[in-house]
Image (tube, rainbow, N blue to C red):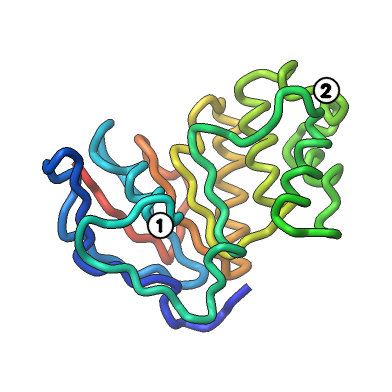
Amino acid sequence: MSTHLQPLVTATDLEFFRDDISVFGRLSFELEAGSMVLVEGANGSGKTTLLRMLAGFIQPGAGQMEWDPEFEHNLQTAYLGHYLGIKDELTALENLVFLQRLAGYRTGPDCKAVLKDLELGDFEDATAGQLSAGQRKRVALGGLLAAPRQLWLLDEPFAALDRAGIAQVERLISEHLDNSGSVVMSTHGALGVHLERLQHINLS
C-alpha cells in the first residue's frame, strides 16, 4: 500500500442534486494514506450518495475529485454497502475465495485464517444462507481481508452487528490504517476507538 503523504483524493466543493434539489453541497476534504473520514448524518442526508460517488458509481453534480495519479482506483478500492455481495448458496469459505478471485487475486491471504480471525472458523462450511445477519456481515467484512485494497468505503458497517461484532470492525479499521490504508465510513453512531488521523463530516 502507498505510504506517501500526497492525498489519495482531494474533494473540492462537491455537490449532488436529486430532482433538482440539493442533497449536499460544497463539500471539501482530503483523504491521505493512513487516515479516515467519518461521514455522519441522518437518513437521507447523503451519506450513501457520497460513498457511491467516491466509488465511482455516480458522478457529482458539481465540484471535483482529484485522485492521486499513482492510485489505481478500480483495483484498489473496496466498497461495502447495504448489499453485502455474498452468495447464499456458497459456504462462508467459498464466498471469501470467490471475492478473492473476483478481485483478481490468484493467491492471497488464507481465507480460513480470515474466518478464524473473525470468529467464524466453526462456520466455514455453512452456507451464507444458513448464517445470521451478523455472521453474514462478518463474512462480507472478511472479503476486505481476503482481497486487500488501499481504500475501504464502508456504508454503515455496524448495522446488524452486536457489540462484539462492532468491536471487530473497529479493530479491522484500526489495523488497516496502521498499514497505511484509508477508510471513508458512514455511521449513525460514534466510533469506539481513538484514531489520530480522523476527520468528521456531518451532512445533517
10 to 110, vertically: above or below? below
Between label 1 and label 2, give the one nearer the viewer: 1
- Residue 151 point in image, percent of width and height: 53, 61
Label 1, label 2: how far apart the Cα atoms are: 34 Å
Classify mark 2: helix, strand or loop. Answer: loop
- Tell whether 21 sits left or right of 151: left
CB within 8 Å, label 1 to label 2: no
Local secondary structure at mark 1:
helix
**Residue 40 coordinates in the image, percent (x, y):** 30, 44
Residue 181 position in % (x across, y down): 57, 65
Lower position in the chain sequence, tag 1 or tag 2 = 1
Q: Is residue 136 left or right of residue 153?
A: right
- Residue 176 visible? The answer is yes
Quickly name the residue at label 1.
54
Give the amino acid type for the residue marked by disc 1 in the picture. Leu
Crowding at mark 2 (Cα within 10 Å: few <14, some 14-19, many 20+): some
| Residue 59, quarter of the rendered image | bottom left
Residue located at (26% from left, 40% from top): 41
Query: Which residue does the image show at 41% across and 76% down from the upper left?
Result: 7
Q: Which mark is residue 90?
A: none
Give the residue number, with chain letter if any, for mark 2. 126
Question: Do we see residue 177 in this rendering?
Answer: no
